Image (cartoon, rainbow, N blue to C red):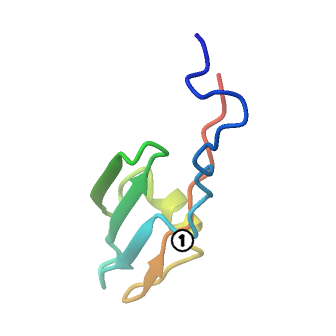
Amino acid sequence: MADPLPPGADRPPARSQPENVGSAYMQPDGTLEMSLRTETNDGTIGEAFLVIPKGDPRYPGMVAHLGGIKPGEGRTIPPFPAPEAS
């Protein structure tokens, strides 16, 4: 496929990695509430609200990703690592 921009034309800057992708709060019972947001280079926006109880298999990894969040604490969520190519 041919490049739609002529040589030397300005391209939009590549989007840098955000400092965070949302916020998290741990309820007194340990339940995680996570509000996530991301935006792609073409401006598409994705948002999600996750509730992860203590028994969920994702729970230990999320707590570790949040730096050991404790009940009653709130934190920003650092970007997640890109999945490995298979």
Q: Residue at x 65, y 38 (%)?
A: 9
In the image, 80 versus 38, the foreground residue is 38
Judge left or right: residue 21 versus residue 46: right
Q: Position of residue 7 (x, y in %)?
A: 71, 29
Q: Position of residue 30 (x, y in %)?
A: 35, 76
Q: Residue at x 56, y 67 (%)?
A: 78
Judge left or right: residue 67 versus residue 62: right
Kind of element beneath mark 1: loop
In the image, 81 versus 44, the foreground residue is 44
Judge left or right: residue 51 versus residue 16: left
**Mark 1 Cα-neighbour bin, 10 Å: few <14, some 14–19, many ≥20:** some
Which amino acid type is shown beneath numbered disc 1?
A: Leu
Question: Can you say whether 63 is above or below 39 in the image?
Answer: below
Question: Can you say whether 37 is above or below 74 in the image?
Answer: above
Residue tagged 1: 66
Residue 23: which quarter of the image? bottom left
Q: Residue at x 34, y 51 (%)?
A: 45
Q: Position of residue 47 (x, y in %)?
A: 30, 55
In the image, 72 versus 77, the foreground residue is 77
Considering the image in quadrants, where does the C terminus appear? Answer: top right
| Total labels drawn | 1
The residue most toward the right is: 8
